[in-house]
Image (cartoon, rainbow, N blue to C red):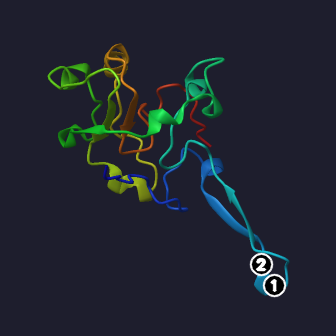
Amino acid sequence: MKIYDITAEISPALPSYSEKDVFRFEQVLQLKNGDACNLSRVMMSAHTGTHADMPLHFIENGQACDEISLEHFYGRAKLIRLRNKQEQDILEEDLLSLDIQAGDIILFDTGQSHNMNKLLKKDYTALSPCAAQFLATKKIKTVGLDYISVDTYNALGCVDND
């Protein structure tokens, strides 16, 4: 099986929801400075770059990442190109004619991946609640989008607008 790595490069250029979430990398110790080893520190939100939202992110007492099987994150995937959806939500009607089966990994290419190294674009394409519910009823394995979240910018009201 051929493996495709679709992760965004981790760098300070990744879009983030607030200044608190910006990726930071720091050299703590360095051999060249006489330290016993090279040691670095990485600081970032778990909601930065290519990431997986766990049920705990949305559901009180939902599963955390150490409680989710890695099987959700590998396998054959169906790539669905919806490039005409830029700045519009993916709707249930966009999915009705597609061959989506239980256990599928669904990846949406909406043409937004080039924005993964820029300031946060707040009007990005996301899944509408009805489209998300449709995918849940299909019992898919995993869903992914080519930008920062499957939710709209203000969907849950948890954005820190500092």
Residue at (14% x, 22% y) in the render: 97
Question: Whole-percent x and y of residue 158?
Answer: 58, 30
Q: How many marks?
A: 2
Hey, which residue is sitting farthest top in the picture?
Answer: 137
**Of the numbered discs in the image, which one, if any, rests on residue 41?**
none
Residue type at mark 2 is: Gln
Residue type at mark 1 is: Asn
**Of the numbered discs in the image, which one, if any, rests on residue 33?**
1
Query: Quarter-wise, where is residue 84 in the image?
Result: top left
Question: Whole-percent x and y of residue 5?
Answer: 39, 54
Distance between mark 1 and mark 2 Cα atoms: 5 Å
User: Is there a contact, CB below 8 Å, between mark 1 and mark 2?
Assistant: yes
39 horizontally vs 11: left or right: right
Residue at (35% x, 52% y) in the render: 3
Question: Whole-percent x and y of residue 139?
Answer: 37, 18
Give whichever of 145, 140 is nearer the camera: 140
The residue wearing badge 2 is 30
Query: Quarter-wise, where is residue 80 in the image?
Result: top left
Please tell me whether residue 155 is drawn above or below residue 160 in the rendered image.
Answer: above
Question: Whole-percent x and y of residue 61?
Answer: 66, 17
